[in-house]
Image (cartoon, coloured by chain):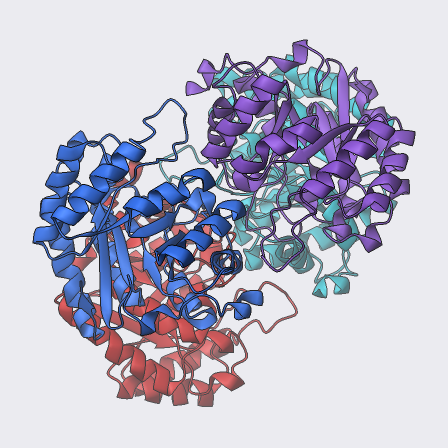
Chain colours: A purple, B cyan, C red, D blue
């Protein structure tokens, strides 16, 4: 497997980036940045809980062109402003080579979504920008990608030089319909055997239902994941996108409490 | 969903059967009973660790007719003898309506394997025997069965009267090839929403590799499972069947240690 | 692959059994035998079209125990009586080792359903009976079975001696939900490379909708299949089981017409 | 389903574009344009057989960044030159918004590959260019995309105005490993029910083995497909990419012969 060539991707767990040795990093926030109020109200909740990374989408890849497509650069402005005000590092998705540099002007961490895991032109471009501008990159697994394909995709990010790459398992597509996707938690120990890259879990997109997010977050941490990226919204009922899978303020607090307990027994802290 | 009709299956968590409220039940043992020595040596290890249930196959459903098919009734005799000697309750698979009664003569718990989840003639027969002879039944999920189909299959076991039925998720078949099957841990919280039946996890058959069994066992308990059924062998290198996924004595001890820690933070004990 | 050992299964295409060299064999009939009238009315239609095999289930494997389970031996009596009256050979499913001999008393061809492809006890029993009583056996592919597993399952049928075994692809379970199952027509040329066994296609269970059955039947014959097994009912709207996927008399006539044309260009006749 | 909104995509079968009413359109050519000689030798074969469309990749989306990535613009020059010399219309893949206009300078038909079906930025850009420059677009199905998602993706191509969009089924990812992907031929009649868009089949990428391409091409035409896109190479043994699934000159001739026969019985000609 060529993934052995992967010397250009940082062995991230030895340095303090998004992933920090001995810690579970939590990234929380709404699926889409809808407006300033929504993002700030959610930021208050997250910040008050001691979470240090906030997510929010400005360019939204939507199955239908007739659905809300995101606020684009206006959304990025909100992301940056609110992030700075509440001292939260920010994570957002890059969906096209032409807006990759703009995204990097505003966000701390660049995310490649599941639909773009094999968009190699985008991977190269984001890798280039991440290297030059010292940004971390979260690479979500394609929903029907083999782990080998995922690791090779990560190689595209490191062609220019060392980049902090974080893998993110977010559910694979199977025959099962009880959850939106099937969360492949075995990816965590499998990645440990094949790669030095850290791996985080997105239980929100995998489950598609908020009440399954907490048990699967506990399981992810117990399996050895380095972090979680979860959808949270100050008022899920009013969300424009994916409200049914977003945690409300009480639930995100409960998630943190439970995840801390599981982390403690495997010698990790939560941040 | 007709599963609501399922009043005939015991609400098992209220009574002490294989599943006991507040406890994680561990079932360990070799895939197949190979001979008296192998089974006894493994029983010693398991018993010394305080595990109370031992598994071992006497009738083995094998993909090829030219592979070892199990010791059949001779294997059941070993199962019973060693089980009694080491004070271990025993679990073994029933593969045909004609040997169901014989299996019940020897074993405490009857198991329906993944290949037979939709063998309705077998389910009816085992349900009948389990009811009359007060045996618990472990019903493994078919490797490509929807959860709704699984719950309806469990209804076949309760047609004669109340039976202790325990569901067992053992991995589903997906495109992924890094593990033998994909362990669908979300089945645990999904089952909690749809049914009163307890659910245990078989990480050994799902993973197909012993080194992935411990992290996935931790995850299973963190997800809320009621128990684990794992393959253990006093000397996996010599196993006739599935040695590569069997834990050796040191590993089974380590599994117990780690699972106890995770169980403790969710308020459960391990037995 | 051990399937090379498979010398005990007849190289069916050289002899005239269910499969005849140079012919596409059509098997048609209702999912379940519901009563004498339904079966006879359907038999009239089938027989008038020159089809020589009729199917009908007497023991129905149903997902829910609360659904209609088939007429059992009473259904077999109808099968035999009507089959003889209209000079149709009969095909029906065996679901349990204990009723295998009874089924063989009434039917010409024994069918193993998709849920029982890995019910090895049943395979052995049916193989034994088929050998002794000169019955052909249709072995449906498990809906999530690898082709290698299917061929090894066919070996269980030939342990006693030469049996006419016909493989039947009936759709596999995938993420796709537009059809009930995904019909894997590539199984036809793949089987040709790996085995001497003939292969027929069941488009009715694969599609789950009658209007997709004709195009997929044409495709099956074009891919090289040796036959088709399709659901037909004199009045699908009144069917107790699977009416939405049954062809009505006009549609079964149209299917035959179209299939004959495709068969003709690959040098085959339809019977 | 919003696909009903799709009035902006041409009802292609009424006009003569890539798809012509009453015809099966064949597109053949190598996976990658390797050099002028390879492309010209292959063009000679294709042209001599009366095929009117030739494919060849200049920008190759490769799983590994260390594999051959295509000749890029130099490849496009070869494509155009040889296409004109042999009077073949040309088809090639667009992989990035920034090279979409360049590709349109050289090729007649723009292809969106399976990995980019949900790369919505690319779809919008290609739709825009296709509308302005009167190019047809082939939209391959994502290998794990639902048909609904595929049709909604096609809507992104028609946002600027009427574009000739041709859907292409190229295999979906399932548990089955006997073929590279599972060809979902039922997509043909399903698309007929849901959309006015034409649909062609790519048996080469689906099968991954050249000897399975001819039977599956026959089946595709019998199922009602409007065309085929197949990999052909004047000397597959020397191909840099996907040689094992490319047809050699004799095989492509045989494919044409057999496809014509099947087409004839459903009232179609091959071009």
Residue A211 percent across, percent down from the top left: 80, 46
Quadrant of the rendering where the N terminus of chain A is positioned: top left
Residue C264 picture location, percent across and down: 15, 71
Residue drawn 45% across the image and 72% down it: D193
Residue A221, compared with residue D137, is above or below; it is above
Q: Image quadrant of residue B265?
A: top right
Instruction: Examine the rendered structure and indicate whether residue D151 appears above or below residue A183.
Output: below
- Residue C206 in the image: above or below residue A12: below
- Residue at left 86%, top 33%? A46
Residue at far top of view: A14
| Depth check, front residue: C150 or B82 | C150
Left or right of residue D151: residue D220: left
Apparent side of residue D53 relative to residue D177 in the rendered image (left or right): left
Image quadrant of residue C76?
Answer: bottom left
Residue toward you, C56 or D252: D252
Q: Which residue is drawn at 41% across and 25% down?
A: D65
Instruction: Kindly tell me whether residue C219 is visible in this rendering.
Output: yes
Q: In which quarter of the image is the C terminus of chain A?
A: top right
Number of numbered discs: 0
Q: Residue placed at 70% from the left, 48% from the top?
A: A208
Q: Where is residue C151 in the image (x, y as percent from the top left)?
A: 33, 46
Between D156 and B226, the one nearer to me in the picture: D156
């Amino acid at each position: 497997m060529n993934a052995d060539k992967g010397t250009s991707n940082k062995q991230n767990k030895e340095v303090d980036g998004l992933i920090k040795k001995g810690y579970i990093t939590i990234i929380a926030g709404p699926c889409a940045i809808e407006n300033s109020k929504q993002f700030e109200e959610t930021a208050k909740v997250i910040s008050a809980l001691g979470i240090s990374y906030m997510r929010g989408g400005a360019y939204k890849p939507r199955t239908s062109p007739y659905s809300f497509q995101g606020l684009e650069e206006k959304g990025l402005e909100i992301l940056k402003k609110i992030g700075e005000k509440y001292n939260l590092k920010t994570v957002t998705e890059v969906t096209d080579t032409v807006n990759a540099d703009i995204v990097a002007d505003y966000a701390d961490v660049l995310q490649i979504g599941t639909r773009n895991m094999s968009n190699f032109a985008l991977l190269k471009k984001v890798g280039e920008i991440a290297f030059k501008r010292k940004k971390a990159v979260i690479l979500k697994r394609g929903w029907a990608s083999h782990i080998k394909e995922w690791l090779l995709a990560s190689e595209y990010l490191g062609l220019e030089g060392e980049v902090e790459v974080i893998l993110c398992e977010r559910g694979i597509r199977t025959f099962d319909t009880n959850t939106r996707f099937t969360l492949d938690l075995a990816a965590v120990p499998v990645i440990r055997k094949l790669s030095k890259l850290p791996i985080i879990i997105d239980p929100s997109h995998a489950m598609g239902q908020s009440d399954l997010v907490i048990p699967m977050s506990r399981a992810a941490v117990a399996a050895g994941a380095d972090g979680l990226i979860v959808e949270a919204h100050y008022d899920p009922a009013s969300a424009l996108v994916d409200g049914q899978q977003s945690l409300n303020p009480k639930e995100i607090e409960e998630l943190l409490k439970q995840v801390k307990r599981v982390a403690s027994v495997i010698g990790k802290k939560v941040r």
